[in-house]
Amino acid sequence: MDSSVFTASVCYGCAFISVLVSSASQILLKQQANDETKRKGFIWKFLNWRVIVAYGFLFLSLALNQVALIQVPVSVLPCITATSFLWIFLFSALFLKEKPTRRKVLGVIIILAGVAISRL
């Protein structure tokens, strides 16, 4: 494939999409862990649609990270990936109806401050 397709903006976009896909995967896994219907059998915990889709998303996230590394510096990608804590926090409140506590908000603020400081 022509390397001119992988411009810096495409690679940065892949990095951000990778974070969102990974966060969605973690929300699916959390939904399954919180599932009240506790089906019988050990295998049910691992062979159901949420877990299978979540691991597919994680694989997609890894592939997107590999594309991102074509143009995104290795020193920048972990900072983009660290924003997943913010997205998981927001997605948990939106989709799982979790109440944001002061500790969680403070934790997200500390993580974002760390990302900002690391980029100085």
Image (tube, rainbow, N blue to C red):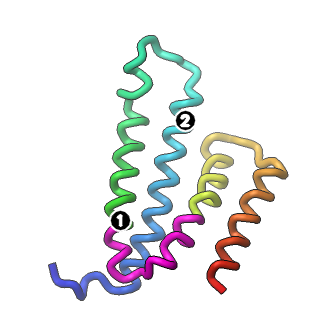
Give the residue number, with chain letter if any, for mark 2. Answer: 31
Most distant residue in the top direction: 40
Residue 65 in percent (x, y) is at 38, 66
- How far across and down, in percent of the image, does residue 8 sit? 38, 86
Where residue 118 appears, as percent x and y from the top left, is 64, 78
Quarter of the figure that contains the N terminus:
bottom left
* Residue 112 to residue 62: above or below: below
Q: CA separation, marks 2 and 1?
A: 24 Å
Looking at the image, is 40 positioned above or below residue 8? Answer: above
- At a point 49% along the width and 60% down the height, the residue shown is 20
Residue for point 80% across, 58% down: 106
Q: Where does the magenta region start and end?
A: 66-82
Q: Residue at x 55, y 26 (%)?
A: 35
* Residue 57 place in picture, x, y as percent: 38, 50
Q: Nearer the viewer, mark 2 or mark 1?
A: 1
Tags 2 and 1 touching, CB below 8 Å: no
Q: Which residue is mark 1?
A: 64
Element at label 1: helix
Residue at point 43% right, 63% down?
Answer: 18
| Residue 80 in magenta stretch | yes
